Structure formats: structure tokens, C-alpha cells
């Protein structure tokens, strides 16, 4: 009888030890209750409790966690109905508060975030809403983090995943963007034409300047030739005078021939005088070349 009682007592001790040894995994904390009242918290590793009197109350995940914010309808300040969804990143830093201060921690965080997200977005216009996602997330984060601090939770980030306006508004925005692109293209084309006209005007100006410069050089050359002829005549050189008369005669014939009103050119009968003049021009040219040499 005694061996049986000893064996039973030994088995009872083993069961008590098994019930009293608690292995807490990394990233978790266990709250310990005595007769239903919180007493202390077991940290990761091997822990011992008194069985029957003490028990594990909550197994709290202390790692960073993510909650998805389901798409919800929000009316903006300019009466645009948009659908918004996002994610919340949070981490428990106080296991007893997270276990006993709120009944359903994840549901409470989710509902608190959705409510404040609607409030923040509802106070903004659509253009601001679409372009300031980071600012919206930061404002919601500040509100939610302060509210969840009493639950032993630290809200790390609130990210806006998608903002979807109504289809009618999307089509209107696409038409507006198309009009803006066409406007920019027309402005670019007009600027190109303007630059082309400026370059063309500058080219015409340069060409006119070159023509004027050529005329000036031609006038200077003619003046110099006239001066040389005048000096030769003053020195008694008759050939110079013949050269001058022949030059004017040839120029007059050229203008007469180019005239649209004249179809026939009458040459003088005394061609010997003309030939003599041409000969005089040749002699004058030779004498001028000899003087230069």
C-alpha cells in the first residue's frame, strides 16, 4: 500500500512541476494571475509558477504587428466621395495594459484609426488629399498614438495605401490632364516658331549688312577709280579720259539692254571711235600696271 501511495505522490509532484514550468518564446510576454488577479509578467525564457494558485493569464505578442485598414468611403471638404485604405504598424510595450485595459486590442486600434482617418480626410479638399498622403498619415499617427498609449501600445506608422476617387471624377481628371498636355505642346510649338522667326530675322539682318558693306566697298572702289582717272586727266593723259567715257558708255548700254521697255539696241555707225576708245582703255590699263610695278 505504501509503495502505491509513494508512487502516486511522486506522480503528483511531477505533474505539479510540469504545470509550474513555463517556457516563454522570444517576442512574447506572459501575464501571471493568482486566482484571476494579475500579479506579474514572465519574460522570454524559462519561468516557474506555483501551479493551481497561479496561472498564465494572457500570452502577449510584443513584436511589431500590422493591421490592414479596409477600404472605407470618405467625403472630402469639397464634397468628393473617395475610397481610402491603408495599414497600421504598432507594437505592445506594456503587456499588462494591453491585456487588461482593453477587451480586444486589435479591433480597438483598427476602429480608432479608421475613425480618425475619416475625420482628417474629411477636413481636406481632394487635391490636397491626393498629394499629401504622408502628411495625412502623420496627422492620424499623432492622434492614434496618443490615444493608444493608455493601452500599452506604441503606434509606429500609419500608411495610406490607396485613395480612389469616383470613376466620373477620374475621367474628368484625365480630360484635364490631356488638356494640360495639349496646352504645353502648343506653347512649345509657339516658342519654336518664335525662335525660328527670330533666327530668320537675324539672318536677314546679317545678309542686309553684308550687302550694304559690299555696296560700300564697291562705291569706294569706284570713287578711287574716278580719282585715279581725274588725276590722269589733270596730268594731260587723254587715254584716261577715254577710259572714263568708255566706262560710262558701256554702263549705259547695259542698263539700256536690261530695260523691259526696249527690244532693239541701235549701235553707233562710227564704230571706229568705239574701237579706238577700247584701245585707249587697254593702253591706260597697261600704264597703270607699269606704275604699280
Image (cartoon, rainbow, N blue to C red):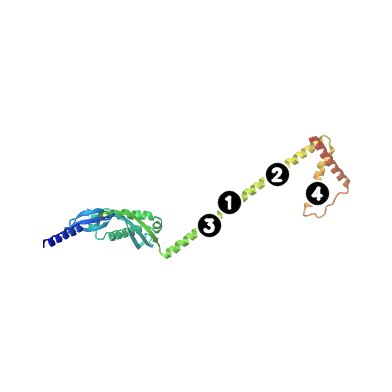
Residue displayed at 23% across by 56% down: 22
Mark-to-mark CA distance, 2 and 4: 24 Å
Mark 4–mark 3 contact, CB under 8 Å?
Answer: no
Q: Which of 17 and 137 is in front in this view?
A: 17
Examine the rendering and report whether any part of residue 97 can be seen: no
Q: In which quarter of the image is residue 96?
A: bottom left
Q: Position of residue 209 (x, y in %)?
A: 66, 45
Which dot, 4 or 3, sits closer to the camera? 3
Q: Earlier in the sequence, mark 3 or mark 1?
A: 3
Along the horizontal axis of the image, is 81 left or right of 153? right
Q: Earlier in the sequence, mark 2 or mark 4?
A: 2
According to the picture, the residue beneath numbered tag 2 turns out to be: 214
Mark 1–mark 2 contact, CB under 8 Å?
Answer: no
According to the picture, the residue beneath numbered tag 1 turns out to be: 195
Outermost left residue? 1
According to the picture, the residue beneath numbered tag 4 turns out to be: 253
Circle 1: element type: helix
Figure quadrant of the C terminus: top right
Residue displayed at 83% across by 41% down: 282
Q: Earlier in the sequence, mark 1 or mark 2?
A: 1
What count of labels does the image hold? 4
Circle 3: element type: helix
Mark-to-mark CA distance, 1 and 2: 28 Å
Q: Position of residue 242 (x, y in %)?
A: 83, 41
Q: In which quarter of the image is residue 26?
A: bottom left
Q: Earlier in the sequence, mark 1 or mark 4?
A: 1
Mark-to-mark CA distance, 3 and 1: 15 Å
Q: Which mark is residue 185?
A: 3
Amino acid at each position: 500500500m505504501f509503495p502505491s501511495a509513494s508512487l502516486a505522490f511522486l506522480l503528483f509532484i511531477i505533474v505539479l512541476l510540469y504545470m509550474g514550468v513555463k517556457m516563454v518564446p522570444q517576442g512574447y510576454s506572459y501575464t501571471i494571475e493568482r486566482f484571476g488577479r494579475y500579479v506579474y509578467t514572465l519574460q522570454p525564457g524559462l519561468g516557474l509558477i506555483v501551479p493551481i494558485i497561479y496561472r498564465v493569464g494572457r500570452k502577449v505578442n510584443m513584436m511589431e504587428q500590422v493591421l490592414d485598414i479596409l477600404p472605407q468611403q470618405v467625403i472630402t471638404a469639397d464634397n468628393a466621395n473617395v475610397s481610402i485604405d491603408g495599414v497600421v504598424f504598432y507594437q505592445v510595450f506594456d503587456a499588462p495594459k494591453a491585456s487588461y485595459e482593453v477587451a480586444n486590442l486589435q479591433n480597438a486600434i483598427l476602429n480608432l484609426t479608421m475613425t480618425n482617418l475619416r475625420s482628417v480626410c474629411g477636413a481636406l479638399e481632394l487635391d490636397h488629399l491626393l498629394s499629401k498622403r504622408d502628411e495625412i498619415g502623420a496627422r492620424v499617427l499623432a492622434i492614434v498614438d496618443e490615444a493608444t498609449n493608455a493601452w500599452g501600445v506604441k503606434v509606429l506608422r500609419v500608411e495610406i495605401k490607396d485613395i480612389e476617387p469616383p470613376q466620373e471624377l477620374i475621367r474628368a481628371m484625365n480630360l484635364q490632364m490631356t488638356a494640360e498636355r495639349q496646352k504645353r505642346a502648343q506653347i512649345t510649338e509657339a516658342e519654336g516658331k518664335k525662335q525660328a522667326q527670330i533666327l530668320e530675322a537675324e539672318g536677314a539682318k546679317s545678309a542686309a549688312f553684308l550687302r550694304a558693306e559690299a555696296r560700300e566697298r564697291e562705291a569706294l572702289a569706284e570713287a578711287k577709280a574716278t580719282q585715279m582717272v581725274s588725276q590722269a586727266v589733270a596730268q594731260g593723259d587723254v587715254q584716261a579720259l577715254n577710259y572714263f567715257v568708255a566706262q560710262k558708255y558701256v554702263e549705259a548700254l547695259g542698263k539700256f539692254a536690261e530695260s523691259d521697255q526696249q527690244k532693239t539696241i541701235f549701235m553707233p555707225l562710227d564704230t571706229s571711235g568705239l574701237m579706238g576708245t577700247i584701245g585707249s582703255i587697254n593702253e591706260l590699263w597697261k600704264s597703270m600696271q607699269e606704275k604699280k610695278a
